Image (cartoon, rainbow, N blue to C red):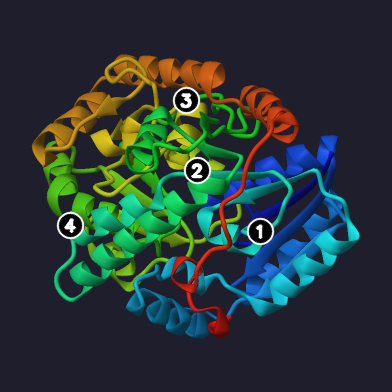
Amino acid sequence: MRILMLAHRIPYPPHTGDKVRAYHVARHLARHHELTLAFLVDEAADLAGIGPLREITPRIEFAPLSKPWGVIKGLAGLAVGGSLTQPYFASRRLRGGLDRRMAAADYDLVYVSSSPMAQYVARVEMPVVMDFVDVDSDKWSQYSQRARPPLRWLYRAESAGLRRYEAWIARWARLCLLSTPVEEALLKSFAPWAKTAVVPNGVDVEFYAPVASASSTPTLIFTGAMDYRPNIDAVVHFCTDVFPLIRREVPEARFLIVGLNPAPAVTALSALPGVVVTGAVPDVRPFYAEAAIAVAPLRMARGVQNKVLQAMAMGLPVVASTLAAAGLSARPGQHLLAEDRPASFAARVVHLLKTPADRSELGRQGRAFVEAHHSWEAAFLRLDHLLAHSVNARGTRSPAPSKVALGLERLR
């Protein structure tokens, strides 16, 4: 098939959750189909990723994205009842490039990774598969619950506007993909007309292989983009409310915060006893190997957490919040541990630090779960079937969207 794939950010390097899935999907599609990959670039340093992506497919279309101008467009869209997210990712340059490519090539299918990119193919006649991954409008709702005015009001408005946009996409997309049954049910709760299917996130089980000998040092690890609000909240909460309880029982315990672009609130945590903030690292695996336990104390989370999958794949026992674990079909107590109350979370970690046999068994069970349920190979077998069915199925399209639905077109 000839497939056009859209991603809201350049999917290389795949070092953040939103890029991991897009990268692996693009690589898989390019191996089996004629793929054109289109995306936006909002960081100058990310331009270095274009070369590696051209090795996957020579058909690349991209445009730079100005963050300040994107914010202005987004706020304008929010002010007229739309969403902030969709106008932020609107680009005249990318739209022009895509229009030229769609006029020149007879694509069989458009695969849209992340809802903001649906605006570029709202009027096309070919089948569109919308990979929502997670329901982003609910993420903004979670943000509003932990924010103070005026941010609380802004986040609520964004959640409402984005939910209307997601529901509108679901009216005309041939198929809507979600990463978990929980996300699928959430989309259906406000867009019951959506044609949906679940394709879980995967993990490269060969790349993230268990280390030869597990670490015996009382070191904990959290990984992720450290300028992402849920990750910032998670590590600040952990260092404030949980880690002191752990060090009371295990004074030599260390906490590694590993990830790019640490926000000031994260950098400040390095002043606390036992806390290490690394910033960006070329390879996260040596840090996993240094740790005895991975923690995921997220209080805002949607879908499958790649950080949890990676840690489990490497044979690390994981202690997570119930939200961080909710996207997995893993059984708490067998494949990972799930706790929310600081004292209970700390007690679970302390027990594992003091009981190597339990720590080893939980890590082994976690690795086995990932191998059985979250390999990319299994995910792509399902994806291939769904894409082929979407091309062959009959479908209808909605009328052309209004400016409110798509944001302020003149600001692109």
- Relative side of 142 to 210, left or right: left
- Relative side of 287 to 249, left or right: right
**What number is the disc on residue 315?**
3
Say what amino acid the circle numbered 2 marks: Val
How crowded pointer 3 is (Cα within 10 Å; few <14, some 14-19, many 20+) is rated as: many
The picture places residue 122, in percent across and down from the top left corner, at: 61, 59
The disc, 3 or 2, on the residue closer to the chain's N-terminal end is: 2
Say what amino acid the circle numbered 1 marks: Val
For numbered disc 3, what is the local secondary structure?
loop
For numbered disc 1, what is the local secondary structure?
helix
Q: Name the residue beneath numbered marker 2.
A: 133
The disc, 1 or 3, on the residue closer to the chain's N-terminal end is: 1
Look at 71% across and 78% down and name the residue there.
93
For numbered disc 2, what is the local secondary structure?
strand
Q: Name the residue beneath numbered marker 4.
A: 145
Residue 16 appears in the figure: no
The disc, 4 or 3, on the residue closer to the chain's N-terminal end is: 4
The picture places residue 145, in percent across and down from the top left corner, at: 17, 57
